[in-house]
Amino acid sequence: MRRHTWKLVGVAVVVAAVGVLIGLYVSKLTTEAGSPSYTVPVKTVNGKPVVDLTIQTVAAVGPELSPSHPDFVSYLVRNTQGKWIRSTVWRLPAHATVHVTIYNFDGASGLRNNYLARAQGTDGNAYTIDGKTQNVISPDDASHTFAVPAYGLIVAIPGVADDAKNQCGYAPCSLSNAHRTIQFTFHTGNTGHIRWQCFVPCAAGWLYGFGGPMQTIGYMDGFLDIT
Amino acid sequence: MSAAPTSAGPNHARRVIVAWIVLSLILTPLVAIFLGPHIPPGNGSDQASQQTVDNTVMTAIVTPIICLLTVFFVYALAQFRKPRGGAITDGPPLREQRTVQTLWIVLTSATVLFLAGFGTYELLQNGAGGGQGPSPVAVPSGSKLQVQVIAQQWEFTYRYPSYGGLETSQLVIPADTLIELHVTSLDAVHSFWAYQLGIKADANPGVDNVAYLQTKGPRTFSVHCAELCGLWHGYMFSQGKVVSSSDFAAWVKQQQKVFSAVKQYMPPYATAYYPDPQRRAG
């Protein structure tokens, strides 16, 4: 081939390679960037996988866990060493029973759609709040939700009272801070990459409360990597 | 303008036109008869079937145009290429031809006007599955089941005013029923798209966008958001069902039990909602 033909081929290859790299970057950015996957330890009970998932929700994630966005509202997950880490991509086994405990240290923001205040997709379509079994809360009391739309799972999390003492400023918060404890059980399905999200417009300072941490993986949204 | 025949050469224009007419006469019926029934969105509803017919008509109309371009392109490549070993010579001169110009303007204008008239007629039948805003022009006659589609980041929920304002996470509708969809949003701009049913309507906050749907037999269909609405736009999809009347009644009964817990907190049914966007998060 002539010299200019080789040049053309070279330019085409470089352009294609750059395109692929941009695609991979955008793909990574919109899936797991900023939130490394956390593999939740699995027990086996009666031959079936069972998982204990312990998470907390905080009003401000703090500079220690998120130097670039210390004021972002966020979910955290507790790892096997009992340390709270900022990861919202959780690896869970397929067809497993998942016992979830959520410690919420944030105040109420209120739901935009009151319908989402009813617990759905959990065992018995109910959950416990500070030890008391309930299936609904007042939508105005909702601080966050844990929702996996693909499973029809939604749990509205009540907020800490505005006048509660010893409120947590920055994460990680300790259980000596004012908090609510929410517990429920759900079941995973087949393998897949399934998103979860918060439905409460809880991102303070962002347009309609739905920008920033609500639109960034690693804070109020994530994936269940069902393997 | 056209390539004028020369005394020594063939009449290229005549050759191209003859080839075009023959090819169009063969391909257009084939496209309409064999390809038409497979053109999306299918036969999931009256609106979907109507859209399939519309798409077939437009594909059939465009077939002769594609044929003309293809014939001209292939003919030009074969006839006007540089002869092997020969020199590059200039082609025949182009001269103005009033007849050709007039014909071109008349034919293209007729095509465009026909499509405009045809499209308007089809829209006026029943809205053709599109959102018509709060005051629809094309309202099909007959009793209608009203269903509200509520979009929010990032899920659709549905309210049934005929059943006490029941709200659900899944869209289930009865077969062989005229449905009046009221599409709205609680936050950003979304778009409700039930592809197999041929329904697509924008969901704007504070706006009641009405679309009509005449269901056929039981089936499943997918619901997607068709307006880029944020991080989880790509995940804002679900599956809906068209079910028999008896199954629909049983489903409503079951959903009302689930709904009863939250019913006390629900706002009265309205064609649009104005939730406080600020709350504490503002």
Image (spheres, coloured by chain):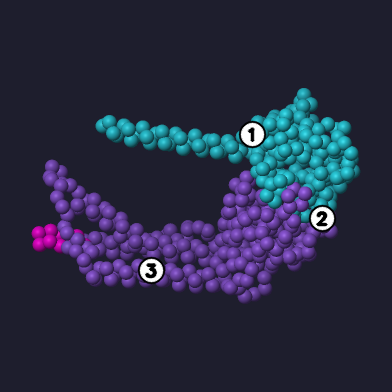
Chain for disc number 2: B
Q: Is B73 positioned to the left or the right of A29 in the image?
A: left
Q: Residues within 10 Å of mark 2 (few under 14, many from 20)?
A: many
Residue A174 image point, x, y percent? 83, 31
- Image height of B13 relative to A16, above or below: below
The quarter holding residue A79 reads top right
Q: Which chain is purple?
A: B
The numbered mark, 3 or 2, whose residue comes first in the sequence reads: 3
The quarter holding residue A52 reads top right
- The amino acid sitting under disc 2 is Val
- Image height of A217 relative to B145, above or below: above
Is B8 colored magenta in this rendering? yes
Residue A6 image point, x, y percent? 31, 32
Q: CA distance from mark 1 to mark 2?
A: 36 Å
Q: CA distance from mark 3 to mark 2?
A: 56 Å
Q: Secondary structure at mark 3?
A: helix
- For this orientation, the residue located farthest to the left is B8
Q: Residues within 10 Å of mark 1 (few under 14, many from 20)?
A: some
Residue B119 image point, x, y percent? 48, 69
Is B193 colored magenta in this rendering? no
Residue at (56%, 38%) from the top-left corner? A27
Pointers 3 and 2 in contact (C-beta within 8 Å):
no
Q: Nearer the viewer, mark 3 or mark 1?
A: 1
The residue tagged 1 is A34
The residue tagged 3 is B111
Task: Specify the segment rendered in magenta.
Answer: B5-13
Q: Which chain is cyan?
A: A
- For this orientation, the residue located farthest to the bottom is B141
The residue tagged 2 is B262
Q: Secondary structure at mark 1?
A: loop
Can residue B7 be seen here? The reply is yes
Q: Nearer the viewer, mark 1 or mark 2?
A: 1
